[in-house]
Image: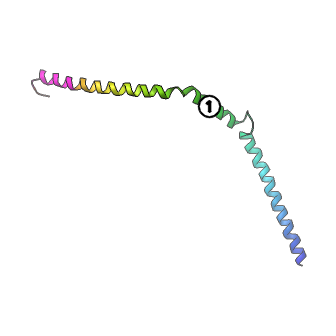
Amino acid sequence: MITLLTLLSCLAAVALLLVVAVYLILIHRELDAIGGSPTSFLAKIRFGLRAIETETGHLAPQVTKLNAGLASLGDGLAAVDQELETVVGNLTGGEK
């Protein structure tokens, strides 16, 4: 009786290992189709992202210069606004 139960337990363990192995092989095939070859979807996405990174890499220094220019322009426009308020005040006799 003990021998039969031991044999059945071993067969169940082997069956479990076989099922796990089969499913791991199936999972590996699916993942390989997604990202395992140079023509896979993942490789194409990576290639596209690398191209975007290369093409937009020069924007960071230009944006810094643009921000500095816009900040000085904002200061200048604030001064113009104050002058225009003074002119409007003088033209309307102090009324707004």
Secondary structure under tag 1 reads: helix
Looking at the rendering, which quadrant does residue 6 occupy? bottom right
Give the farthest residue toward the bottom.
1
Query: Residue 88 location in percent, x, y?
Result: 16, 23
Looking at the rendering, which quadrant does residue 52 occupy? top right
Q: Is residue 39 shown left or right of residue 76?
A: right
**Residue that label 1 marks:** 50
Query: Residue 33 location in percent, x, y?
Result: 74, 40
Q: Is residue 18 above or below residue 90?
A: below
Q: Is residue 93 shown left or right of residue 11?
A: left
Give the residue displayed 54% in from the left and 28% down from the top. Answer: 57
**Magenta-drawn stretch contains 85:** yes
Q: Which span is picked out in magenta?
A: 82-93
Query: Residue 90 location in percent, x, y?
Result: 12, 22
In the foreground, 79 or 7: 79
Q: What residue type is labelled 1?
A: Arg
Give the residue displayed 21% in from the left and 26% down from the top. Answer: 82
**Dividing the image into 4 quarters, which one contains the C terminus?**
top left
